[in-house]
Image (cartoon, rainbow, N blue to C red):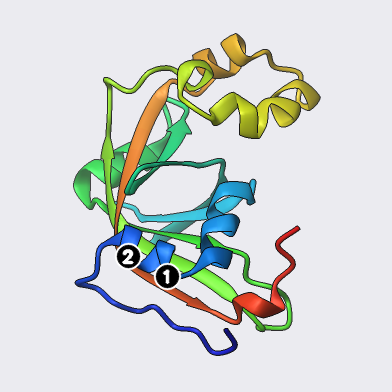
Amino acid sequence: MAGTNCSTPSARFSDMVTDQPTLDKILDHDLIGLLTAVDGEGQPQTSPVWFVRDGEDIVVYNKSDTPRLGSIAANPKVSLSLRGDRRGRGAVLIEGIATREPDLPPAKDFPGYVDKYGREIDRLGWTPESFSSDYSAGIRITPTRTRAWGLDALDTR
């Protein structure tokens, strides 16, 4: 898979993922992504986030009082970066449209969220309930483009 690039803006995300078993594994197992949204002054703002997949989409939970929500409301184009290594051997970059989803269940009830992040929630002193209260704003990212390369060079254990 060296040099793999699935930079296909018109392709469905599932098509890009199912053609890439390593990419699928990265999306399901990586704990941290870097979410970039553009603020009202046009400045990109990047923050580490926890994420889970929901079919074709990616779901992130956010504190309800952060500027990121206003940035997304004003400009829903975002990017989520995963797995870039220090030597530039591989990375996953996902571009998409983010929307605030007030009807998402709390993180503690979202399928797979506590399975993926339960240890981290506990390690950081939360319970699933307290985390869900603190991070109550659900954001859904619908991918529009995925670029990935060097996946075989990345550790996917």
Task: Classify 10 Å Cα crowding around label 2: few (below 14), some (14-19), many (20 and above).
Answer: few
Determine whether, in the image, residue 109 is placed left or right of residue 13: right
Classify mark 2: helix, strand or loop.
Answer: helix
Q: Which residue is mark 1?
A: 19
Could you say where residue 59 lies in the image, as x and y percent from the top left? 41, 39
Task: Determine whether, in the image, residue 1 is placed left or right of residue 110.
Answer: right
Q: Is 105 displayed left or right of 149 in the figure?
A: left
Would residue 92 appear left or right of 55 to someone viewing this image?
A: right
Q: To which quarter of the image does residue 103 belong?
A: top left
Q: Is residue 134 above or below residue 12?
A: above
Look at label 2 and name its amino acid: Asp
Which residue appears at 47% of the width and 26% of the height? 111
State how far apart marks 1 and 2 are (Cα): 6 Å
Is 33 located above or below residue 43 in the figure? above
Q: Quadrant of residue 127?
A: top right
For the N terminus, the quadrant is: bottom right
Residue pictured at 55% horizontal, 29% vertical: 113
Mark 1 crowd level (few <14, some 14–19, many ≥20, 10 Å Cα): few
Placement of 122 over or under 34, stated as above or below: above
Tell me which amino acid carries mark 1: Asp
Give x and y (percent) for residue 60. Answer: 45, 38
Q: Position of residue 117 (x, y in %)?
A: 65, 32
Q: Where is residue 62 drawn, in percent x and y?
A: 46, 32
Q: Which residue position is annotated with label 2? A: 15
Look at 61% across and 15% down and name the residue there.
Answer: 128
* Cβ–Cβ under 8 Å for marks 1 and 2: yes
> Can residue 101 be seen here?
yes
Q: Is residue 7 above or below residue 53?
A: below
What element does badge 1 sit on? loop
